[in-house]
Each structure stands twice: as C-alpha cells, then as structure tokens.
Amino acid sequence: MATREQVLAEMERTGVVAVIRASDPSQLMDVVAALKKGGVTCIEVTMTTPNAIDVISQAARNFAGECIIGVGTVLDAETARAAILAGAEFVVCPVFNADVVTLCRRYSKAVIPGAFTPTEILTAWQAGADLVKVFPATKLGPDFIKDVKGPLPQVKLTPTGGVDLKNVGDWIKAGVTCVGAGSSLVSKKDLEAKNWENIEKTAAAFIQAVKDARTPAPAKMMA
C-alpha cells in the first residue's frame, strides 16, 4: 500500500491520471493493464461505474505495487470511506466537500476536491486538499491556470475536462501538477472494440507529451 506522499509523487512524476468511466466493469482490468503498459499508473475509477467499490477492490488487489487505484466522482464522506476501505489510494471529487477532506486526512489518503473559481480553489486548498481539481476545465483553458498561479503559486492544480493529446502540453507548461484525462485517453470506441493496444499507445503518447512539455527548450545561439 502506497503512502499518501508516494501517491502524490507518482501523480506528479507521470503527470497523467486516467479517469475511467465505463458501463461494463468487467473490462476495467484490461483497461488498467493497457494503461499501465503505456506508462499511466494512476487510475481513477469513478463512482458512476457500476459496482465501483467492487471494481476498485479488485483492481487494487490485481495491480498492487504496479498501479495506484483511486476513486472519483465522490460526493460525500461515506462514499470516500467505503472506497478507501476497498483499497482506493486517493479520492477525487467534482466539488469541494469539507467532510470528505477531513475523512481522507483521517485515513492519510490523498484528496483532490473540485473547484472552478479562484475563491473555491483557495478554500479547498486551505481546507487541506493535496491537489485541487480545476473542473470543468473545458470552459477555462491553460491560461486560467497561469492567471491563478500568479497570486496563488503554492496551490497545486490538476485540470479535468477537455484535456487531450493536443493540449496536454499546454496544461503542463501552464503550471499544473498533473492532468486528469478521460475519454481522450480511454475512448468509448476503444472500450467497445476492446482495443487494448490502442489504449496502451494513447497512454504512451500522453506520457511522452508530458515529458516533452517539461523539457526545457534549448537555448538560442547568439548570431
């Protein structure tokens, strides 16, 4: 079982958290295996997945020491506790709920509440969030991160919604700790076709895009 610090370090190292929403939980083990092969090791199983708690428990057992399994779309402390007891190593919420943050702190689990405005972001951070999920990031864009990080450089942010291979580098360069990627990483088409190879390739492309964005540009030669 990873420590809270190890979980956060792995999220930052890879720069990508896979957000999995699936109607067929039987496929999720294959999805996690494909993501792992591609280098994405932090997996968020949303509570909208049928039998999500059982899926989290199975994934946590099957991929112990290889992947970090967390829970997403958590709205209350009771759900967070059930997921943690099932093996979830981190908890993600679409909104800020102080009780969820307190519960996760009690269990020494990483907690990532959602926020949309600078006031909401700071409120979540001061309440004890390890990262603040900027959601829905689709409506904001990377420039919003730059603007927020100006007066709030200490706050660690992770956008979810609208993150894809075309803009993941822009988010990283804007100053986020990591990104949350859902359908752009694990597409409905690939799920239905059970195209695990393509999911692996997409995961590898996301990881490479993060690495490229973090690599300093070469210094220009003086004429």
Image: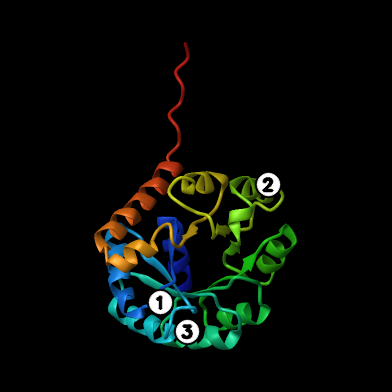
Counting residues from the start of the chain, the first of labels 2 and 1 encountered is 1
Image point 64% across, 52% down: which residue?
140
Q: Secondary structure at mark 3?
A: helix
User: Which residue sits furthest left?
Assistant: 197
Distance between the alpha carbons at the discs numbered 1 and 3 = 18 Å
Report x, y in % for residue 203: 34, 56
Report x, y in % for residue 204: 32, 53
Distance between the alpha carbons at the discs numbered 2 and 1 = 37 Å
212 relative to 163, above or below: above
Q: Secondary structure at mark 2?
A: helix
Along the line of sight, the residue nearer the viewer: 177 or 167: 167
Label drawn at residue 147:
2
Callout 3 crowding tier (Cα within 10 Å): few <14, some 14–19, many ≥20: many
Q: Amino acid at mark 2?
A: Asp
Counting residues from the start of the chain, the first of labels 1 and 3 encountered is 1
Looking at the rendering, which quadrant does residue 185 occupy?
A: bottom left
Label drawn at residue 83:
3
Can you identify the residue that label 1 sits on? Answer: 23
Q: Amino acid at mark 1?
A: Ser
Mark 2 or 1: in front is 1
Along the line of sight, the residue nearer the viewer: 193 or 209: 193
116 relative to 49, above or below: above
Label drawn at residue 11:
none
Report x, y in % for residue 109: 51, 77
Image point 67% across, 68% down: which residue?
124
Residue 143 placement, left or right of 28: right
Looking at the rendering, which quadrant does residue 50 occupy?
A: bottom left
User: Which residue sits furthest top?
Assistant: 223
